[in-house]
Image (cartoon, rainbow, N blue to C red):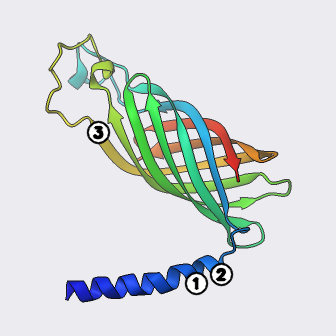
């Protein structure tokens, strides 16, 4: 039964995807890649009695790459998908995720959008907790966590590039601000 359902899905996909691709002309798709940098505050309250005797450094500068594609859905509306990967220097080792974008394009080309998706964050536990802990203290502890991402952003065109600014939260627990440059092709 499962093989039959799988085969049917593959057959439908083989027919539907080329038809959808032909219906959505290549000129309509607006792919982009870019670089991004910012600051991610994890929102840990170090005044909590649970952390007595420790200083918590729960924020990190981040730098990374983005890639995605937008599709026009009406005269000034667009929908798209975007992926990101960032490396941190302090509390965050790395983070990566994907989001869907929905927005509008103003006259002059500026894009204003909201987005939602998922973000996974890998922490550096040794840099979060001060004083420094002995090597091996955090062995066996899962130092990654993920949750839904909600945010908003704006892009201002500069030729084939766009200056972009985003403000996001992950699970309404953290605050992440990024800026960057996206290049369309």
Badge 1 local density, few (<14 within 10 Å), some, or many (20+)?
A: few
**Front position among marks 2 and 3:** 2
Q: Position of residue 101 (x, y in %)?
A: 58, 59
Q: Position of residue 7 (x, y in %)?
A: 31, 85
Find residue 25 and report its image quarter.
Answer: bottom right
Q: Is residue 28 above or below residue 43?
A: below
Q: Which residue is mark 3?
A: 144
Q: CA distance from mark 1 to mark 2?
A: 6 Å
Callouts 1 and 3 close, C-beta under 8 Å? no
Horizontal arrangement in the rendering, residue 161 relative to residue 90 (left or right): right
Mark 2 and mark 3 lie on one chain; the one further toward the N terminus is 2
Q: Is residue 29 above or below residue 147?
A: below
- Residue 11, labelled with which disc? none
Find residue 179 and report its image quarter.
Answer: top right
Q: CA distance from mark 2 to mark 3?
A: 41 Å
Give the residue drawn at x 64%, y 37%.
Answer: 180
Q: Secondary structure at mark 2?
A: helix
Badge 2 local density, few (<14 within 10 Å), some, or many (20+)?
A: few
**Front position among marks 1 and 3:** 1
> In the orientation shown, which residue stands out farthest toward the right?
108
Badge 3 local density, few (<14 within 10 Å), some, or many (20+)?
A: some
Q: Which residue is mark 1?
A: 19
Q: Which residue is mark 2?
A: 23
Callouts 1 and 2 close, C-beta under 8 Å? yes
Horizontal arrangement in the rendering, residue 179 relative to residue 174 (left or right): right
Q: Is residue 6 above or below residue 84?
A: below
Give the residue drawn at x 80%, y 57%.
Answer: 106
Name the quadrant of the N terminus. bottom left
């Amino acid at each position: 039964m499962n093989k039959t359902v799988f085969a049917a899905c593959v057959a439908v996909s083989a027919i539907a995807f080329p038809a959808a691709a032909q219906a959505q002309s290549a000129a309509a798709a607006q792919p982009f890649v870019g670089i991004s940098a910012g600051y991610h505050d994890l929102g840990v309250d170090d005044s909590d009695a649970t952390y007595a005797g420790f200083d918590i450094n729960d924020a990190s500068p981040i730098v990374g790459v983005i890639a995605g594609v937008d599709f026009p859905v009406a005269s000034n509306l667009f929908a798209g998908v975007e992926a990101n990967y960032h490396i941190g220097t302090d509390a965050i080792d790395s983070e990566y995720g994907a989001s869907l974008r929905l927005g509008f394009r103003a006259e002059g080309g500026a894009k204003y959008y909201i987005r939602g998706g998922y973000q996974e964050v890998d922490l550096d536990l040794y840099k979060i907790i001060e004083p420094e802990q002995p090597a091996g203290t955090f062995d066996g502890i899962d130092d990654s966590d993920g949750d839904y991402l909600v945010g908003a952003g704006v892009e201002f065109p500069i030729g084939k590039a766009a200056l972009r600014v985003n403000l996001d939260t992950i699970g309404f627990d953290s605050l992440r601000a990024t800026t960057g440059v996206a290049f369309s092709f």
